[in-house]
Image (tube, rainbow, N blue to C red):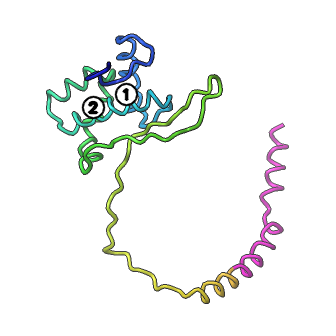
Amino acid sequence: MRHRNAGIKIGRTSSHRDAMFRNMVTSLFKHDRIRTTDVKAKELRRWADKIITLAKQGDLHSRRQALAIVREKDVVHNLFAEAADRFGSISGGYTRIVKAGNRPGDAAPVSIIELVAPEKSKKKDDKKKKPKISAKKKTAASKKTKGVKKEKTAPAPAESPAAPVEEKTSGSDS
């Protein structure tokens, strides 16, 4: 029975598994997005959420705990600098896992795990709503613009002298 045994084994020793996830979480914070198998992505989510929670606390003890896991000092510094701004408004759910199909060699299910950037609230102070146009007016307006677009696009290729100039410059290079 696996009572109170959190985490996955994935056929590796504990030291190999810890080293692998430390490298993966470092790469995730360094590049904001990595491609890995589904099972590893789901486990990596646990590691990443824990590190981001430490970064949101922002004190020295949290920084040292994060440095014990993440391999690169610069990555931890950048994470602690931007964590409060980037993830301060949300509590949990800092990563997104998107299924990306199967890997060609062994048909293993592959996912892309990425850090979630929360949507910023849109301010509507300066923007005014445009008046709604009825469906009849929309179709009439679209017919007019289609006719105008056809007229404008027809003479454009004849007037463009860019193609002969390119030919002349390519000949002078030889």
Number of disc labels: 2
Q: Is residue 18 above or below residue 100?
A: above
Q: Is residue 45 above or below residue 88?
A: above
**Amino acid identity at mark 1:** Val
Say which mark, if any, is on residue 25: 1
Name the residue nearer the viewer: 74 or 109: 109
Q: Earlier in the sequence, mark 2 or mark 1?
A: 1
Q: Position of residue 145 (x, y in %)?
A: 68, 81
Where the N terminus falls, by quadrant? top left
Q: Position of residue 127 (x, y in %)?
A: 37, 75
Name the residue nearer the viewer: 23 or 81: 23
**Residue 111 falls within the magenta-colored stretch:** no
**Residue 158 falls within the magenta-colored stretch:** yes
Q: What's the magenta region? A: 146-174
Tell me, yes or no, whether the two marked residues, 2 and 1, touch with CB atoms within 8 Å: yes
What's the magenta bit mostly, secondary-structure-wise?
A: helix
Q: Is residue 141 above or below residue 165?
A: below
**At x 32% / y 61%, what residue is drawn?**
121
Name the residue nearer the viewer: 131 or 112: 112
Residue 153, image quadrant: bottom right
Name the residue nearer the viewer: 82 or 102: 102
**At x 35% / y 12%, what residue is drawn?**
14
